[in-house]
Amino acid sequence: MNSCLDNIVKQFEYYKILGDKTFEQLNDTQIQWQFNEESNSIAIITKHIVGNMLSRWTNFLTEDGEKTWRHRDTEFEDPYTTKNDMIIAWEKGWNCLFKAMKLLNENDLKQLIYIRNQGHTVTEAINRQLSHYAFHIGQIVYVGKMIKGNDWQSLSVPKGKSAAYNKEKFGKKKDRRHFTDDL
């Protein structure tokens, strides 16, 4: 990794992978499952993430991150009805984010931008969004795990496999790499 921006992109890619690998394990019915009336389905959480991404990352450096065309409350209504529709929207949100990231350079990180008229440096705004997406993607993974039960394919070190995992990692020579390079 050559820069802070490279690391940031790797972190966003990691959370996208967690979502992707969860979606792979689910079908159209399962993305709609809710624990109760007050909880959100994977389809609803995804719709919210996508709405946030499109608002925050469109014209990231020149417009407020809360766009007038965004209707946040509707992100929690009428979720995607098919997994395919959900994934198409998911990819659109991530493409918007990664396109914005590619336009940035290290000098931009101290620039001031706004979200709901609240000033953030670009670094602060990126950290805000990275944390927000990690939170919701954690929910997606957790709900996916609840749905699949014993059929869940672990996205990290499976229970009871830590010793084998560590043995493999410590069996490699020390070098500089990102923890996601093996995914």
Image (cartoon, rainbow, N blue to C red):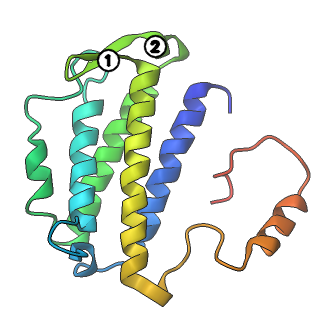
From the viewer's perspective, tell me whether residue 107 is left or right of residue 70: right
Nearer-the-camera pick, 119 or 54: 119
Secondary element under disc 2, as helix, strand or loop, is helix
Q: In the rendering, at what x and y percent does residue 94 appear? A: 35, 45
For the C terminus, the quadrant is bottom right
**In the image, what residue type sits under mark 2?**
Asp
Q: Which residue is painted at 29% across and 45% down in the image?
A: 93
Q: Is residue 62 above or below residue 163?
A: above
Q: Quadrant of residue 33?
A: bottom left
Q: Secondary structure at mark 1?
A: loop
Report if residue 168 is visible in the image. Answer: yes
| Tally of marks | 2
Q: In which quadrant is the N terminus drawn?
A: top right
Q: Earlier in the sequence, mark 1 or mark 2?
A: 1
Kind of residue at badge 1: Leu
Residue 108 numbered mark, or none: 2
What percent of the width, then of the height, locates residue 11? 54, 43
Task: Check if mark 1's residue and mark 2's residue have beta carbons within 8 Å.
Answer: yes
Vertical relation: 120 (above or below) 167: above
- Give the x, y percent position of residue 37: 14, 71
Furthest-bottom residue in view?
Answer: 150
Can I make out residue 25 in this image? Answer: no
Q: Which mark is residue 61?
A: 1
Give the x, y percent position of residue 164.
Answer: 81, 74
